[in-house]
Image (cartoon, grey):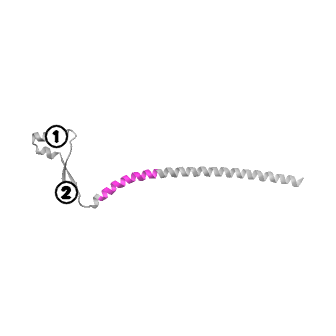
Amino acid sequence: MKLISIPVLDSGKSSRSRFHNRINNNNIDDVNNYNEVVYIDDDDDDDDDDDDDDDDDDDDDDDDDDVMMMMMMMMMIIMMMMMMMMMMMMMIMMVVVVVVVVVVIVIRSALLAYCSG
């Protein structure tokens, strides 16, 4: 664990004017106020690794959500196409059944007429 201080830019002032103010005032407190303490880990802690993994998982979740949406859309399209094909098959089957019934009735009536007379 190392401690390093990084100067933080204040949004209110430009860095150049703040620098000149420090030089003119010789104010050490002002210099210290603009430093932020940052912790740098040399060790591989499990907690930090878990946090990194969680961040990665969040990004992966977004990608997974997009993939899931794409898969859902593909499934919907495939199911709609299958339903259309099933409806077409049912219509064709109904037409075939009607044609077969009409042909059977016509042939039967023709046979009856032929046999009777």
Q: Where residue 3 sits: x, y (%)?
A: 18, 55
| Viewer-side residue, 51 vs 7 | 7
Residue stretch in magenta: 49-69
Residue 66 is one of the magenta-drawn residues: yes
- Against 95, residue 21 (above or below) is above
Magenta span main SS: helix
Q: Which mark is residue 32?
A: none
Callout 2 amino acid:
Lys
Tag 1: residue type? Arg
Kindly identify which residue carries mark 2. 2
As helix, strand or loop, the secondary structure at mark 1 comes to: helix
Quarter of the image for residue 19 reads top left
- The residue at the point 45 percent across, 52 percent down is 68
Which one is earlier in the sequence, the residue at label 1 or at label 2? 2
Give the residue at mark 1: 18
In the picture as drawn, the residue positioned furthest to the right comes out as 117
Residue beneath the point at 37% across and 52% down: 59
Where's residue 115, x and y in %?
A: 87, 55
Near mark 1 (Cα within 10 A), the count class, few <14, some 14-19 or many ≥20, is some
Relative side of 114 to 91, left or right:
right
The residue located at (16%, 38%) in the rendering is 17
Front residue of this view, candidates 114 and 1: 1
Look at the image and say whether residue 53 sits in the magenta stretch: yes
Q: CA distance from mark 1 to mark 2?
A: 27 Å
